[in-house]
Image (cartoon, rainbow, N blue to C red):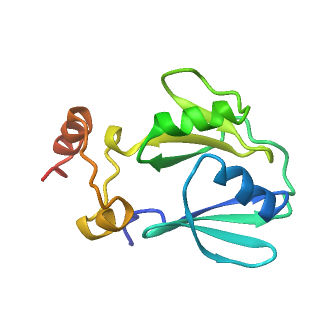
Amino acid sequence: MARAIGINHVALEVGDVGEALDFYGRFLRFELRGRSTTMAFIDLGDQFLALSGGRRQGPDDGRHFGLVVDDKEAVRAALAAGGVDVARSGGLRFGDPWGNQVEIVDYREVQFSKTPAVLRALAPEGLDKSPAALKELDRKGLGG
């Protein structure tokens, strides 16, 4: 049996790829890994987010994905400034214009971790884990 060790990518259906890139670009800095008329691939270092044009499903209420960022509060501020309804503090979750639910989590606050080489590419200035995240990693035997 194979062991699941990570996620390579998440694919979201959107109405229009260009509009989706504009929407997500209002509150996230990113580079495209590639693009066609019906797909765009947002680079996340060793992972990516695929945007697929032509949404065929209705909005999702509970189903969501968590996107790790280097500054959750900066995303919250940009979303609020852009007219997206978000909580003023605490958890950060929102729906995009196509009904996809996205939860924004801060790298420093979760056990999610990157190898030193990938982390240097993603955040050359470095990111430190919170004591709670380090404790969680230690409990699982994954601390260093």
Q: Does 35 appear above or below 87?
A: below
99 sits left or right of 125 in the view:
right
For the image, the number of numbered tags is 0
Q: Is residue 43 above or below residue 92?
A: below
**Image spot of residue 83 (x, y percent):** 73, 32
The x, y position of residue 131, in whole percent, is 20, 34
Dividing the image into 4 quarters, which one contains the N terminus? Answer: bottom left
Residue drawn where x is 56% and y is 40% of the image: 103
Q: Nearer the viewer, residue 47 or 64?
A: 47
> Is residue 122 shown above or below 77?
below
Q: Quadrant of residue 11?
A: bottom right
Quadrant of the rendered image containing residue 10: bottom right
Q: Farthest residue toward the left?
A: 144
Going by the image, does 41 lie left or right of 36?
left
Is 45 displayed left or right of 53 in the figure?
left
From the top left corner, tell me how far across and down residue 36 is, in percent.
Answer: 75, 79
Q: Nearer the viewer, residue 122 or 92?
A: 122
Q: Which residue occupies the foreground of this view, 87 or 112?
A: 87
Residue 77, located in which quarter of the rendered image? top right
Question: Residue at 56% across / 20% down in the picture?
Answer: 88
Q: Which residue occupies 48% across, 33% down?
A: 73
Q: Residue at x 26, y 38 (%)?
A: 133
Instruction: Measuring from the top left, give residue 135's x and y in whole percent.
Output: 19, 37
Give the left or right position of residue 137, taking residue 34 as reference: left
